[in-house]
Amino acid sequence: MIRTQTPEKLAQQQKLDRELAAVLMAISATTRSIARNIHLLSMQRHVKGVNPYEKR
């Protein structure tokens, strides 16, 4: 049996898809920002000559 979606169900699904896309984009932007900050901190440690094996 083939089921067809009602216009209301289709609209609801599209709304959920847009919300999910927005959440995933926010996660992506946050992840990119975190990676950038980690890279910058790593470069700062390298410039300062910090021993990477030193325990804090």
Image (cartoon, rainbow, N blue to C red):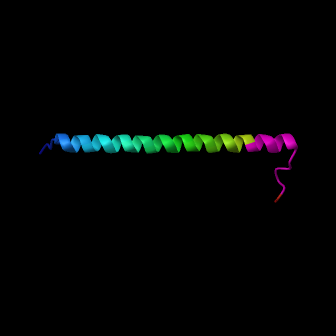
Residue 34 x, y percent position in the rendering: 63, 45
- To which quarter of the image does residue 6 belong? top left
51 vs 17: above or below:
below
Magenta residue check for 44: yes
Residue 25 x, y percent position in the rendering: 48, 40
Magenta residue check for 19: no
Q: Between 50 and 29, which is closer to the camera in this rendering?
A: 29
Extreme-left residue of the structure: 1
- To which quarter of the image does residue 16 belong? top left
Extreme-bottom residue of the structure: 56
**Residue at x 82%, y 59% (from the top left corner):** 55
**Residue at x 81%, y 45% (from the top left corner):** 45
Number of numbered discs on residues: 0
Residue 43 x, y percent position in the rendering: 78, 40
- Residue bounds of the magenta highlight: 41-54
Q: Is residue 34 left or right of residue 26?
A: right
Extreme-right residue of the structure: 49
Residue 20 x, y percent position in the rendering: 39, 44
Q: Between 53 and 41, which is closer to the camera in this rendering?
A: 41
**Residue at x 18%, y 39% (from the top left corner):** 7
**Residue at x 11%, y 45% (from the top left corner):** 1
